[in-house]
Image: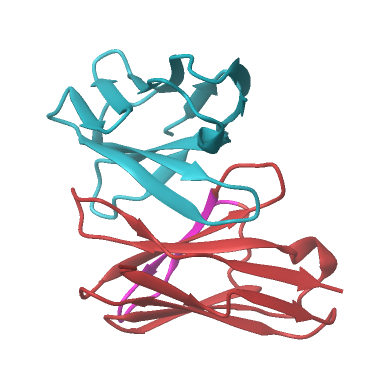
Chain colours: A red, B cyan
Amino acid sequence: GAVVSQHPSRVICKSGTSVKIECRSLDFQATTMFWYRQFPKQSLMLMATSNEGSKATYEQGVEKDKFLINHASLTLSTLTVTSAHPEDSSFYICSSGQIEAEQYFGPGTRLTVT
Amino acid sequence: KQEVTQIPAALSVPEGENLVLNCSFTDSAIYNLQWFRQDPGKGLTSLLLIQSSQREQTSGRLNASLDKSSGRSTLYIAASQPGDSATYLCAVRINTNAGKSTFGDGTTLTVKP
């Protein structure tokens, strides 16, 4: 069964609003989770590394004030897309897993900004 | 910076054919390499995981190999079926405390009946 869940699976929002995506590890405690973004017909690009109890680490070119990450517990990380615009429409996927072991990916959240 | 390349970008084969997908990476300091399948509009399905100390892994009609020193991995699919049509992604997990993954751009496979 799934070891990483995401909610919601699909969301449509208006331009200028904020959207929160949740990522939960179901079978283990995750001190680190990863957030990826996938644009149509492209591969997954790492956005940030979410660290439990501390600040997230963002990849180059990813705006930390626009993509807010909170990892308040060992089983939950949230990604908030603030003031969303149509160009933020994408497929967002989180992952987790013990270091040196398999990474488990969530089912993804499809965000459409109108 | 780790870079992952997958060749070919697209592949079309008749049903029943054996085929090989290629993945290459630039930095050999990795924890593991994982092959995924992604159907259109869907999430990732993990196919095979190869640890850095391993040479290959097999699951059913799939066989993945890893040559860490040369920075290469292959995914071999035997007796392909139309249901194998999908995009195949390889992901390399780097050897650091965070262990984040870098993905290739994928190979889109079409198996014709």
Residue B79 lies in magenta, yes or no? no
Residue B15 to residue B85: above or below: above
Residue occupying the point 66% across, 83% down = A19
Residue B56: percent from the left, percent from the top? 20, 25
Residue occupying the point 55% across, 48% down = A44
For the record, the magenta segment spans A45-60
Residue occupying the point 87% across, 74% down = A114
* Left or right placement of residue B3 versus residue B74 in this view: right
Residue B19 to residue A89: above or below: above
Residue furthest left as drawn? B53
Residue B87 in view in this figure: no
Residue B88 in view in this figure: yes
Residue occupying the point 57% across, 47% down = B39
Residue A48 to residue A44: above or below: below
* Left or right placement of residue B40 versus residue A78 in this view: right
Residue A45: percent from the left, percent from the top? 55, 48
Residue A67: percent from the left, percent from the top? 60, 72
Between residue A32 and residue A6, name the one nearer to us: A6
Please tell me in which quadrant of the rendered image residue B59 appears: top left
* Left or right placement of residue B52 versus residue B86 in this view: left
Residue A53 lies in magenta, yes or no? yes
Please tell me in which quadrant of the rendered image residue A37 appears: bottom right
Residue B109 to residue A12: above or below: above
